[in-house]
Image: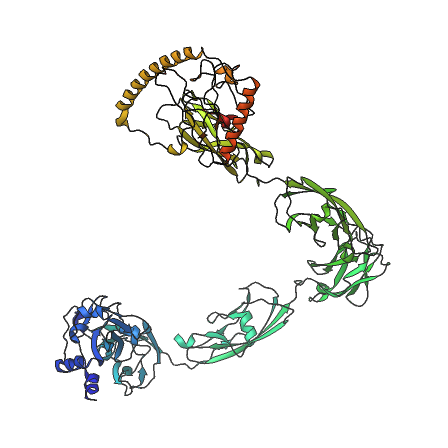
Amino acid sequence: MAAAAWQRGLCFKSDPGMAGGMENRSRKRQVLSFFLCLCVSLGACEMIRYSVPEEKKSGSLVANIAKDLKLDVGKLSGRSARLVSKSSKQYFELNTRSGDVIIKEKIDREDLCGQSDPCLLQFEIVLENPLQLYRIEVQIEDVNDNSPNFSKNEFVFKIPEQIPINTRFPLEGAQDSDIGTNGIQSYVINPNEHFRLDVQTLDTDGSKYAELVLEKQLDREEQAQLMLILTAADGGLPQRTGTAQIRVNVLDSNDNFPQFSQSVYKMQLMENSPKGTLVTTVEASDLDQGSNAEITYSFRQVPDRVLKLFKLNQLSGEITVLGIIDYEERSNYEMNIQATDGGGLSAHCKVLLQIKDMNDNTPEVTLSSLTSAIPEDSSPETVVALFSVRDRDFGDNGRTLCSIQDNVPFALKSTLKDYYELVTQKPLDREKVPEYNITITATDRGTPRLTSVRIIRVQLSDINDNPPVFNESSYVMYLKENNPPGLLIGTVRAADLDTEQNAKVTYSALPDFPFSSFISINSENGNVYALQSLDYEQTRDFQVTVRAADGGSPQLSSEVIVRVVIIDENDNAPFILYPLQNSSVPANDLVPRSAEAGYLVTKVVAVDGDSGQNSWLSYQLLKATDPSLFAVGLQTGEVKTSRPITSPDSVKQKLIVLVRDNGEPPRSTTSTLNVLLVDGFSDAYMQLLDVPQEEEQQDTLTLYLVISLSFISFLFLVSLVTIIAIRLYKTRQCREQYVPSSRNFYSDRNFPTNPAETSGTGTLPRSYCYEVCLTTGSGTSEFKFLRPLIPSLPADPSVAGGSNFDSQINSQLKEEKESVREGRASVSEDSIPRSSGEGCIVNKVIGINENCGQNGWLSYQ
């Protein structure tokens, strides 16, 4: 309880510094140190007060809250110190780095609190960890920044010359937004001989007010007007003042009444007279002088509607038109006019105004009855409509004539006064004219004549005598294949000249299996929908018969042929015909290393199930071991070498050829080709697993090594040619032996078509025959070599026994094949005599490949 008591009394105050406008004067705070220390030790303060003068600039310091509360500045941000304002506007902000509370926005005490005192702004400083709350109250002190101000620059007093002395005239006080000593403290007037100023203080709020007191009798003949200066001053430093002028008009004694020249003014006015038109001028005179002879005119006890229509000039007495004068609303007006002199004496007169009619209203046609629709077979004299004609004007201006156009099968008949009937006059035909617009023309007899027009729409009801008619003799609709079921294909439209139910057309498709099951027709709007997804490759187009029938009785109908054309879409990807892509054993193509640029390696053949440009195919090399070595014909699919083959080129080349069609979006497929680079087809089909997929390109630093190897290779080739020539010479001494085989070998210009044609190119004598079998289904594409069919055969085939020899060869060949299939094949061992000379044939291996084309070519190494 003791802590709460001193918390409520804790206050910091800084000097407002408003005297002399010295806002930058250093603040003086009075701090109750003992109470502040006690407050901080207890952890919270109920209220801390500061004072700050108004109009201080933004950023001005109010107080250092950390210093006043004995808080560590570094802990303000760590304890999430924040300033919470209790007003809608944020006038202060807290700098957590320094602990200063500064002005965020310039404060105007008069806008904030008006005349209220004291003017207080409250906010709270909130600290967390632990939670502490400090309530801050800032008193905004007033500075003398507003001058006294009068509501008018001049005050006019009209005082009769015979008014007694010491008569008081209250003056309107000045207003000052400031309060206290900065508010109004005194009033003074300039020295004069007739008036003095008496300043009084109100007991309620202590405000000052002044009264003008007459000290000397006024004489209009001596001085008709007095000019005084009233000055209001506040108590601020520096002092501010405000002035106003007091004009005193000395009035003459009024002893004569005004007199009108006529007591009654009778006038006429044409209706619809424009604004400002002069109606009349009333005039009165006064025998007095000065203000007593100044006459002002005014309406007296006049209805509001008259004040809206007429204007009276207060000085001249002229009555002019202010609003719209309408004879039909009122034909006469009576106005009482009052003339008042400056002394308040008055006289009265009367103005009688007669309004003259003019032809300003057109005849009005009012429809009383109208038959919405009449049958087209209606008989003559059938009543269609009943209407009346009225004109608000009077006399000839209100008499009317009525007529219709001549080119319609209708006529007008006059019945009662101003009433007419519209009746049929001739037979009607709805198919020729479905409706009529009857123009009724009403004309008055005024000057000038006015005319009004009313159009009546007369419709004819229908009978069912017209069948529906399609807007086209036949329809052709287009539909893209692979359409989703329920897709809108097109619309058929039929029109019926009849109306309502007779013109209600329903659509249906006549049964025509199977095409009628392809589409569905909306019976109401004729929309044609596809019931199922269609394939261009199966159905190019079809046609159905559509019937349109009306809803009349009896029902009428018509038919039309609808042809639906299927548009091809690119929904088929190219299919590779060659080389086959689903083979378990990849196809290999052989290319001699001696091939020049443009050498045909193979050809990719593909087809596309689509048509048109969707089936146009283009070929391109998507990926290759060496992209610079091969090129693919864009349109032909031919794979050719793009440059001569060099020794650094990898033995195994893998090509991926992309086949793309010309559709939108394009579809594509790829074909993988394995190409083996061979030297004269004699070293192909080496162990493929040992060949790397891609050989690294040799670095430029190995250039000298390449030159050296090239030279050694040249010497080797020379030696090899010499050895081959010697061996060829020896093989000519051997007799050729041929073993028939059921296998067909692929041949071209580079391979002999028959083993008998290998003389001069082979490396072994033709008197020997061997077999090698390439296993089918091998994922590694390796060859398995078998032992020779006959290890030792005589050179002369006659020694072998003729046909017995052939049968023996075939039998052994069959046996070797079976052993390969059963996995029983073994490698034979051949013996060579130590006395054998150079060129002696040790054995010969013969391989068989079940593939076709280039995939069936064999090479030995």
Q: Is residue 65 left or right of residue 761?
A: left
In the picture, the quarter occupied by the N terminus is bottom left
Q: In the displayed structure, would residue 672 be above or below residue 202?
A: above
Q: Position of residue 199 (x, y in %)?
A: 25, 83
Q: In the displayed structure, would residue 561 be above or below residue 336?
A: above
Residue 187 visible in the picture: no
Q: Is residue 343 left or right of residue 570?
A: left
Residue 724 visible in the picture: yes
User: Where, by quadrant of the figure, is residue 805 drawn?
Assistant: top right
Instruction: In this rendered view, identify the residue nearer to me: 421 or 196.
Output: 421
Q: Position of residue 225 (x, y in %)?
A: 32, 75
The single residue placed furthest to the bottom in the displayed view is: 1
Q: Position of residue 426 (x, y in %)?
A: 85, 54
Q: In the displayed structure, would residue 336 be above or below residue 803?
A: below
Q: In the displayed structure, would residue 368 be above or below residue 172?
A: above
User: Where, by quadrant of the figure, is residue 134 drawn?
Assistant: bottom left
Instruction: In this rendered view, identify the residue nearer to me: 358 or 692.
Output: 692
Q: How is the image coloured?
A: rainbow
Please name the residue shown 28% across and 83% down the image. 213
Q: Is residue 92 left or right of residue 672?
A: left
Q: Is residue 199 left or right of residue 321?
A: left
